Amino acid sequence: MTTSSLKKLYLDFFVKKGHQIIPSASLVPENDPTALFISAGMHPLVPYLLGEPHPLGKKLCSVQRCLRTGDIDFVGDGFHHTFFEMLGNWSLGDYWKKEAIGYSWEFLTKILQIPAEKISVSCFAGDQDAPRDEETAQIWQNLGIPREKIHFLGKKENWWGPIGQTGPCGPDTEMFYDTGKPVCGPDCNVACQCGKYLEIWNDVFMQYEKTAAGRYRWLKQRNVDTGMGVERVTAVLSGFEGDDYRTDAFWPIVEKIQSVSGQKYAGKNQVLMRIIADHLRAAVFLINDGVRPGNIEQGYVVRRLLRRAAVKMRLLTGKLASAGELKLITDTIKAKKELAAVIGEEMVKFEKTLDRGLRQVKKSKNFDGKTAFDLYQSYGFPFEITQELAQECGQKISQQAFAKELTQHQQISRQGATKKFAGGLADHSAVVTKYHTATHLLQQALRDVLGDQVHQIGSNITAERLRFDFTHPQALTSEEIEKVEKIVNQKIKAGLPVTMTTMSLAEAKKQGGLAFFEGRYADKVKMYSIGDYSKEVCGGPHVTSTREIGSIKVTRQKAVGAGRRRLYATLAHGS
Ligand code: ATP
Ligand code: MG
């Protein structure tokens, strides 16, 4: 079984069950300031899960690219990756538990022909907020799963949401494949990560709404949201259960690492090779989605992935991977042309920082956890490397001292990350909506002033500012910026109505709608028109009249790579 044949089987199955296919969104959320990456298939669907009608209807399915930096420490086992693809099907207020679980069961046992006796499931055990999900357990039992393979677990394992303080949430039911390995101890169960039970699929039932008062009440629109890992399931179906690296998603990369390093994918090299393959693949997909190595946010993640891969190559071969070697490896992954240049440039930089880092290591007389952590933080040196370097200088650092620094830091950044996630997603607040409409006006005004070659390559909105990336060969002059601001402010003052119609992408383009994310659109799209001034294919939401926006001020511009510019703008709020 290949990953692409699994994806096809899945989509075909759900189309037959009346679902519409939605294309994968970019790994970088387009209009969601609250998260760095898309981490599940449901993530781009949040507005629709909250009740906005989806242009394709109530039954959807997709293959979504996902990135989970939170799983980076698991990478090295055979089934957690930073980048992976998730299959998903959704009911937006349409079918419910019986149908959803029935589909999962039919797909696993009939289409994929996984023997029923290999499957166990978990259901929500119940607590003070919501009762035990006996309904779900009963459905599984009726399908033929014996009671002893139905496990009841708590909130940590079998509950989803809400994303922020309030909103949709509910129990889920997870499906596990028993690899046949022995249990790892008396407490080993489906929730254990030892690799005996592989979680393959999760069906989430959004049936409650958590209110501001902390109560859980029945939700009006009840949704089903499911997620299945492409790599894990392909491995199971190919007889490589628990080792996704043997599937076509990774094996060509692993083979290239073997030939470049002259080592075998076995023993302790196996973990190193998995990390290298995982990180390079994730970096390639991020670069493909427009991320460039840098020191903040998404860019920093790509940088760390590439550096960590290069450093792991050093552990494998005794020397740091060269740009050329990384290129050979990443060539095995389908990618855009500019990739090699991006990786090459980053590796040259890294060789330099690594040099500086090495000098610092040689200088420091007393290695301690803090030194190791600083090297880790500033130069991307994993602890093992620092430890080795210390040894070369006849010094020793304790793993505990480093771990202590690291945990402290992780707690801080995790708080940051949860805040980032919790802060919004659902928070398509009034201000963000204004920025969103302003972005459409800005794009049209830039085209008026600079020419039609201008098109959006990305945008990012927070409650404080908008950021807009577009194609343009040189810096804007201050006159050009003034002109752009003036046009946008005129259009805001004019109080143009913002309207939305649903149509095919071809029709939207025919009507002059801007749509610059090729391949990312579904068959039916939403086209937003701002008076006669701007037409753009977009998911929304938007203000109803431009007057609500207030006024715009461009605050900053910069280059973001050859032929790409970035503008920042803020709004002074209107009515
Ligand atoms: P796990 O407990 O194995 O980490 P999870 O509970 O975090 O998984 P979900 O958030 O329910 O997983 O995601 C849905 C599905 O996506 C999982 O059932 C699994 O098949 C897949 N999946 C989740 N995380 C990863 C990952 N890091 N790498 C590969 N596949 C994953
Ligand atoms: Mg899960």
Image (cartoon, helix red, strand yellow):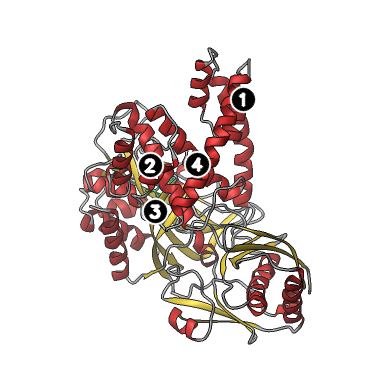
Q: Residues within 10 Å of mark 1 (few under 14, many from 20)?
A: few
Task: Tell me the SS state at disc 3.
Answer: strand
Q: Nearer the viewer, mark 4 or mark 2?
A: 4
Circle 4 is placed at which residue position? Answer: 347
How much space separates mark 4 and mark 2, taking CA atoms? 16 Å
N-term mark: 4 or 1: 4
Circle 1 is placed at which residue position? Answer: 360
| Cβ–Cβ under 8 Å for marks 4 and 1 | no
Circle 3 is placed at which residue position? Answer: 85
How much space separates mark 4 and mark 3, taking CA atoms? 27 Å
How much space separates mark 2 and mark 3, taking CA atoms? 15 Å
Q: Amino acid at mark 2?
A: Ala
Asked if disc 3 is less than 8 Å from ligand 1, the answer is no
N-term mark: 4 or 3: 3
| Cβ–Cβ under 8 Å for marks 2 and 3 | no
Q: Nearer the viewer, mark 2 or mark 3?
A: 2
Q: Nearer the viewer, mark 4 or mark 3?
A: 4
